[in-house]
């Protein structure tokens, strides 16, 4: 029997900030010091240490200037909304998350960064530093079809199956290479009936736990399976969001493959032997605590998980690792064999993240200098070792880490030949030269269309807790998309 010390009921630092601090209301009366760069940034899973280190370096490189990080907080998205609509906005740089960046850019509240793309960092043009999966997402057409860059990406988040390496090593489980092997592993873990005692509580170790508070975490593996089954070109064509018919799985084989990937997901999470009970009601903190306590061996999550687990200040022997997503090779219950046609492709998290400069900033060039520091090899290495994640930029040289988890994460990430995001992946020339292409990009940027149609149409919750069959859930998505498609196009003046 394995005994692990219990994690106390400690809430994540990022989730316990009670309310927006005094700085939230200070925008209207605050003085705009010309020697202070005012940054608003999200302090959540990746923490604040990395940006504190960069700010110190920036001040060393810019004598006489200071960086104000008092608004590097969990409530950054709300703070940005408040400040950017203020008549006296003194902010100079935003690093945050949320699809509202599309609205701000369309309203002219973000400064154009067109010139920045041609500047150099580490001897490389900024546009060439951007990770390949994000390169084409930085262009936004205005109503005249002219392209501008109002937002740069922030991280190239690594989502997937994270696992308790300590337990894998102790019980000599092999890392599954295919979906069939993953199911076999789940059955093995269940059959071994391993009991874990935490405090006065003893329970069986289960293969998986998940957080009902963030069922979008399922996307990270499901989308990767989808791409494996469909291939890069089919995913590229689907993510042009060109027709409501694309969401009819009986007509579109690519969407049918997404349904197949969802069936694979359900083969795990729809089986009570493979998942801890009552996960649908678990918060991130509760699910991750169960994972860390050894109640479950694996978890679908993102790379911020490492920093969040560190915040628990655990003194047990838990070691976190991520596996390469098992290849989508399996035979379904009807005896149909499914084979991946492209095995080295992965989905990258970060579609809703942004680095932007408010149009009202009086220190735009200074803010651009901070962005360039962030995307430099120095900035990349700082983020990798202190935030324990990967920025959405390509290092010009070799970057290193002494952290075992980061080396594991970097190894898995770089083992894929191709990566993709939710973005329509048109090139700048295609967007500028083809009205239909521009229309599709505008439809996407209106925040109405995505892989699921809208975030609210994501089927996982309906399937797990709403009793929906997978066919019915996908039919419902297709029907709803068809009903709203014309209206969505009209909303952005495309009809």
Image (cartoon, helix red, strand yellow):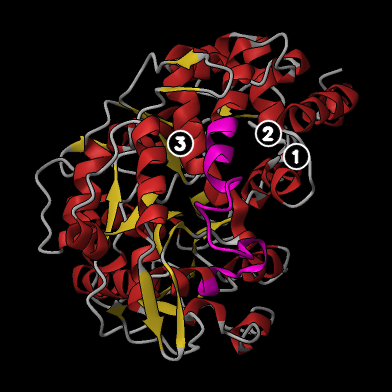
User: Which residue is disc 1 drawn over?
Assistant: 457
Disc nearer the start of the sequence (2/1): 2
Does residue 360 appear to the left or right of 36 in the view shown?
A: right
Please tell me whether residue 142 is drawn above or below residue 322 in the rendered image. Answer: above
The stretch drawn in magenta includes residue 418: no
Rendering quarter of residue 190: bottom left
Disc nearer the start of the sequence (1/3): 3
- The disc at residue 131 is none
**Percent position of residue 366, x then y:** 37, 61
How many numbered marks have been drawn onto this rendered protein structure?
Answer: 3
Label 3 neighbour load within 10 Å: few <14, some 14-19, many 20+: some
User: Which residue is disc 2 drawn over?
Assistant: 452
User: Which residue is disc 3 drawn over?
Assistant: 114
In which quadrant of the rendered image does the N terminus lie?
bottom left
Please tell me whether residue 12 is drawn above or below residue 353 in the rendered image. Answer: below
Q: Residue drawn at (69%, 15%), measured in percent from left and top? A: 242
Q: Which residues are magenta?
A: 262-286
**Pick the front one: 397 or 419:** 419
Residue 158 can be seen, yes or no: no
**Percent position of residue 112, x then y:** 53, 42
Mark 2, secondary structure of its residue = loop
Q: Residue drawn at (34%, 30%), measured in percent from left and top? A: 178
Disc nearer the start of the sequence (3/2): 3
Please tell me whether residue 237 is drawn above or below residue 148 in the rendered image. Answer: above
In which quadrant of the rendered image does the C terminus lie?
top right
């Amino acid at each position: 029997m394995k005994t692990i010390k219990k994690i106390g009921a400690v809430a994540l630092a990022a989730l316990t900030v009670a309310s927006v601090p005094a700085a939230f209301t200070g925008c209207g009366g605050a003085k705009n010091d010309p020697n202070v760069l005012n940054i608003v940034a999200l302090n959540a899973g990746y923490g604040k240490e990395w940006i504190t280190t960069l700010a110190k370096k920036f001040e060393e490189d810019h004598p006489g200037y200071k960086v104000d990080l008092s608004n590097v907080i969990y409530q950054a998205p709300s703070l940005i909304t408040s400040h950017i609509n203020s008549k006296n906005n003194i902010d100079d740089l935003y690093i945050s998350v949320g699809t509202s960046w599309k609205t701000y850019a369309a309203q002219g509240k973000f400064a154009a960064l067109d010139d920045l793309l041609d500047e150099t960092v580490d001897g490389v043009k900024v546009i060439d530093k951007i990770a390949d999966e994000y390169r084409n997402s930085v262009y936004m057409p205005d109503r005249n079809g002219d392209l501008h860059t109002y937002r740069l990406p922030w991280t190239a988040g690594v989502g997937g199956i994270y696992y308790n390496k300590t337990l894998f090593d102790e019980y000599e489980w092999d890392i599954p290479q295919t979906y069939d092997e993953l199911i076999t592993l789940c059955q093995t873990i269940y059959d071994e009936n391993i009991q874990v005692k935490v405090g006065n509580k003893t329970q069986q170790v289960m293969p998986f736990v998940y957080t009902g508070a963030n069922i979008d975490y399922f996307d990270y593996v499901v989308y990767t399976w989808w791409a494996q089954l469909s291939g890069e070109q089919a995913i590229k064509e689907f993510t042009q969001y060109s027709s409501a018919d694309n969401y009819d799985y009986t007509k579109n084989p690519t969407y049918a493959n997404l349904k197949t990937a969802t069936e694979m997901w359900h083969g795990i999470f729809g089986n009570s032997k493979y998942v801890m009970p009552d996960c649908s009601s678990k918060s991130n903190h509760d699910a991750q605590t169960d994972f860390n306590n050894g109640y479950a061996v694996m978890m679908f999550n993102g790379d911020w998980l490492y920093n969040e687990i560190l915040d628990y200040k655990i003194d047990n022997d838990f070691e976190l690792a991520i596996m390469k997503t098992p290849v989508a090779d399996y035979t379904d219950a009807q005896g149909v064999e499914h084979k991946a046609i492209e095995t080295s492709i992965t989905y990258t998290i970060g579609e809703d993240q942004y680095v932007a400069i408010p149009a009202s900033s009086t220190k735009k060039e200074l803010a651009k200098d901070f962005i360039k520091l962030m995307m430099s090899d120095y900035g990349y290495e700082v983020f990798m070792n202190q935030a324990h994640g990967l920025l959405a930029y390509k290092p010009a040289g070799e970057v290193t880490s002494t952290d075992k988890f980061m080396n594991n994460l970097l190894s898995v990430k770089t083992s894929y030949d191709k990566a993709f995001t939710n973005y329509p992946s048109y090139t700048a020339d295609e967007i500028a030269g083809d009205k239909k292409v521009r229309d599709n990009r505008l439809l996407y940027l209106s925040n109405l269309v995505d892989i699921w149609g809208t975030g609210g149409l994501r089927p996982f919750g309906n399937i797990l807790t709403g009793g929906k069959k997978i066919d019915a859930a996908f039919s419902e998505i297709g029907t709803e998309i068809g009903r709203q498609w014309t209206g969505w196009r009209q909303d952005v003046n495309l009809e």
